[in-house]
Image: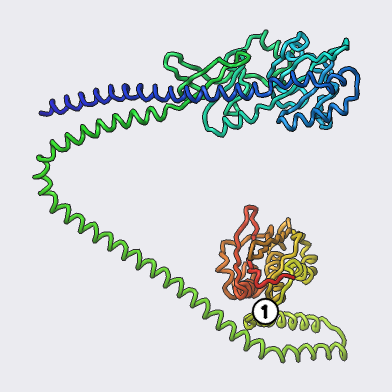
Amino acid sequence: MRLSKILSVFIILCFATLLYWASFSFFKSQEIEKAQARLTLYRSTLETELRHFAHLPFLLSLDPVVNSTLAGGATELLDHRLARFAQSAGLDAIYLMDRDGYTISASNANSTNSFKGQNYAFRPYFQAAQNGEMGEFYGIGATTGIPGYFYALPVQPAGADLGGVIAIKVDLSGLQDTWQASGERIILSNDDGVVLLASDPEWRYTTMSPLSSEQRARMLASRQFGGEQLNSLDWSFDAEKQTAKIVDERLLYLSTSDLPNSWTLHFFVPNDQAITRAWLVTGGFLTFALLAFSLFQLNRLRSVRSALRKSEREETELRSANTRLAVEIEERLAAERRLQKTQAELERSGRLAALGQLASSVTHELGQPIAAMKNQLVASELTVGPSTLSDKMQGLVERMESITRQLKFFSRKGRDSFEKFDLVDAINGALELLEPSITDRRATVRFHRSEQPIMLTANRLRIEQVVTNIVRNALDAVQDEETRQIDITIGRASTEAWFTVSDTGHGLRGKTLGDLQEPFATTRESGEGMGLGLTITAGVVTDHGGTIEAHDTATGGTEFRVVLPIGEQTND
């Protein structure tokens, strides 16, 4: 029984393999027929493009202005006439050469790459025209560096001994652009095997076969391809299988040499559709075989299914219960995280509220004693005179005033003093206030100002206090560093303004911005500050609906970024 099953599977696989190759050959022949039709269309389009202007040199050779100019007449009239002809016909250039190959008139006479005065006697199309034939030639322009297809015919004015050559240059780049847009792989090569046009720009000016030294010498003499290296294209083809391998890709390959100048048009087509269809046919057969085998086995499986149904129902119920339990656990964990976050925010709000009440009480109670102490010290200096003790007491009183000024910010809320101002002016005001501290610490502050004003509707004094606190922190951070540099950058988005302050100081020292926003938290040494600066700063930014961020930089310093809403703006 086991051997018969193995034999059946082996026979099915052998038949599927034969079916695949037979269907692939059939679909491949269909793809080749379609490709042949496309190749014929491309060949017809190329011939039409080449022969569209073939009659024009003959008509120009009969033009009386051309003949009179060649006979010695002024060239300006012909320059203008040729320029009009070239523009209306869509030509790259039209130009007239004397019998020695010097250009005496050109449609691009007024351009920087004018042909006028250039000698093209080395070009094969000029030599063919001198022999009385129609000269045709494809090459890179010796003057402009732009490739094109050239037509040339001799011009012999009636009654004149001197003759010349009239030539036109046709730009074929539009044809190549069409090939690229089609998404198909096309190559046009000349009789030497050099790729003239290609749907892939990297293939252009490569060779389909190695060039002999004689061929290279001829191309060099005519400067047909300028400074191009003419390296060999990585490709090969199998004429029997009608396939080609180009740059590690195997494709169906067709070509035609039924073109002017013995050119060859190469057409490469992916065989993906033939492979896909062959696999679909083979897959359909295997599906049918599998379906038949499944039906055969159905009767044997019915008894087993009956026994398994109960087990499957139990397993489904258990899986559903596990899923519900997992969802419930995740919901509870999320609720716990939200609760913890809310508790932390409530604790922080409570601390700040208590601090605000304490700050209001302390500043009120200490205001009059501090003022009285200042007055007493002034009176003492007037009666007794300055002394070391008096100076120390003055310093202590000023420090007490500074502390009470910081505490006042916890009770200043609302939009009572909102105004419209330029953020650049606010930063400049803060820097002027900090100028003594900047000089004292011998720090360098670079303000990268915006060329345009950045207008805000906010409390200017409190925004200046934000800038002052952040820059003062940066000055403290760089105080003991060898490099003491602070950079301030400013910018604006659609509805927001922002500024950053970066320093070369000691960094956050492992703390986060949330840690530093806690009242009395600081990265400075003990006695160097109260740790209220960032608390005040964060409160001001939050009151204005903004955000503040801080992180250590790669160089070891700290960067603060403050984003503020622009607020209600009116057109001036």
Query: For residue 59, what is the image quadrant?
Result: top right
Q: Residue 531: in sight, yes or no?
A: no
Screen quadrant of the C terminus = bottom right
Query: For residue 502, what is the image quadrant?
Result: bottom right
Q: Secondary structure at mark 1?
A: helix
- Front-lying residue, 212 or 541: 212
Screen quadrant of the N terminus = top left
Q: Residue 159: in sight, yes or no?
A: yes
- Front-lying residue, 270 or 330: 270
In x, y percent, where is residue 422?
74, 69
Q: Check disc 1 and report the residue beneath it.
A: 406
Query: For residue 364, what is the image quadrant?
Result: bottom right
101 vs 20, left or right, is right
Please state which amino acid type lies under the numbered disc 1.
Answer: Gln
In x, y percent, where is residue 401?
72, 82
- Front-lying residue, 521 or 168: 168
Above or below: residue 107 compared with residue 499: above
Q: Which residue occupies 62% across, 67% down?
A: 523
97 vs 571, left or right, is right
Q: How is the image coloured?
A: rainbow
Mark 1: few/some/many CA within 10 Å (<14, 14-19, 20+): some
- Front-lying residue, 136 or 326: 136
Q: Which residue occupies 63% across, 65% down?
A: 495
